[in-house]
Amino acid sequence: HSGWGLEPMEPTTAFPNYIIPKMDGIGANEYIVTVTQNVIDFYSAGNTPAPWELNMWYHTLSAGFRTRLSGETDFPCVYDERVGLARSYFKPEGVLSYDSYVDALQKGRSYVTDGASHIIDFSVNGVEAGTKNSELSIKRNQPLGITAKVVANLSEQQDASDAAIAERPLDEQPYWHIERARVGKSRNVRVELIVNGESVESSEIAADGQWKDITFSHALKESAWVAMRIYPSAHTNPVFVQVDRKPVRVLKSAQWCRAVVDQCWKMKEPKIRDEEKAAAENAYSEARKTYDQIIREASAK
C-alpha cells in the first residue's frame, strides 16, 4: 500500500483542527481502513510527495499500528525514468536471498532511501530495528540512547540543476531527493530523531560520503515509536517503545485516522459496485469502531 492521492483539503466540521486529505486519487489510500484489519504487509514510500506518504504512515503508527516501511518506484506509471528511485536496503539474517529480503521487510530490518543517504544499525537502548519484534519496554522518564551510522553524499558546490531540484515544491518530482535535504548552500544535511511523528532533535552532518556515528538521548513520558530520517532522502523503520507496558496511543492521530475513514468512504462509496457495497460498508464500519476504541483509550490516559 502507498499513500498515492493524498492531497490536503480544508479542515472537516467533525475535526476542525485537522487537515484531512481529499482521498480522491486512485492509489491505495484505503490503507486507512485495511490497516485496522491486520492485512497489511508493508507501507511503500519514496514514490510520491514525502509529506503525503509519511503523514498517513505517521498517524497510523501513532494510533498504535505497526506497519513497516518499504521503498517503491511505480515504474512507468508515476516515474518513467528508471526503477530504483526509492529503494529498500535490508540486513539479512543468514544467507542473502530473496526470502531473507522479504523476511527483513516484514520485520522492519530495513530502511528506505533514494540511494544518496543511508542510515544503518539504527538502535534504541541496544534494540536494533527489526530485531526482538522492534520492541523495547521501559519505565516513565527512563532515558533512551538512540544510535545509528549515517552517510550522505552531496557535491561540494550546488550547481544550477541541483538548486532547481532543491527549490521545487515538495509535490513536484523528484519527490525524494538528497538535494532537498541540503542545508542552505552548504554540504550538510540534518539527521532527525522522530518520536511519534514529530522531529524532536537533529544533528547536522557533512554529506561527504563518510560514515558518521550519530547518537541522541531522549526521555519518554508515554509510549512512542522512534525512528531516524534525512528528509526527504532516507527513513528508518521504527522501534516501538512501551512505557510502563502501555501501547502507543496519540489522541490527535487517532482522531485524524477516524476522520479520514469517513472522508475515504465519501470519495470511494459512489464508485463501489452494488454487489460489493455491503461488504465494503461493513469494512469501513469496523474500521470506525477500531479507531473509536483507540480514541477512547487515548482520551483515558
Image (tube, helix red, strand yellow):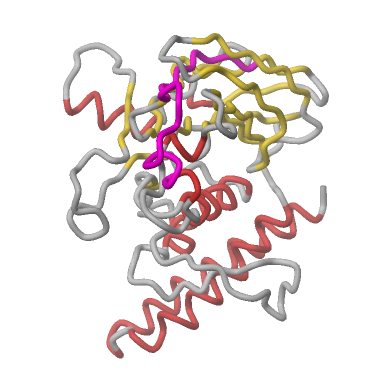
Residue 182 locus on image (x, y percent): 52, 32
In the image: residue 112, left or right of residue 261 = left
**Vertically, is 250 above or below 159?**
below
Does the magenta run of residues contain 75? no
Q: Residue furthest front?
A: 160
Which one is nearer the viewer's eye here, 104 or 218? 218
Does the magenta run of residues contain 153? yes
Residue 218 locus on image (x, y percent): 74, 22
Quarter of the image with the N terminus in it: bottom left
**Vertically, is 20 above or below 246?**
below
Which one is nearer the viewer's eye here, 27 or 106? 27
Residue 152 locus on image (x, y percent): 44, 21
Residue lying at 41% horizontally and 14% vertically, measured from the top left: 209
Residue lying at 51% horizontally and 41% vertically, measured from the top left: 66
Residue 52 locus on image (x, y percent): 49, 57
In the image: residue 202, left or right of residue 74 = right
* Quadrant of the rendered image containing residue 156: top left
Residue lying at 66% horizontally and 35% vertically, measured from the top left: 195
* Quadrant of the rendered image containing residue 9: bottom right
* Quadrant of the rendered image containing residue 18: bottom right
Q: Which residues are magenta?
A: 146-165
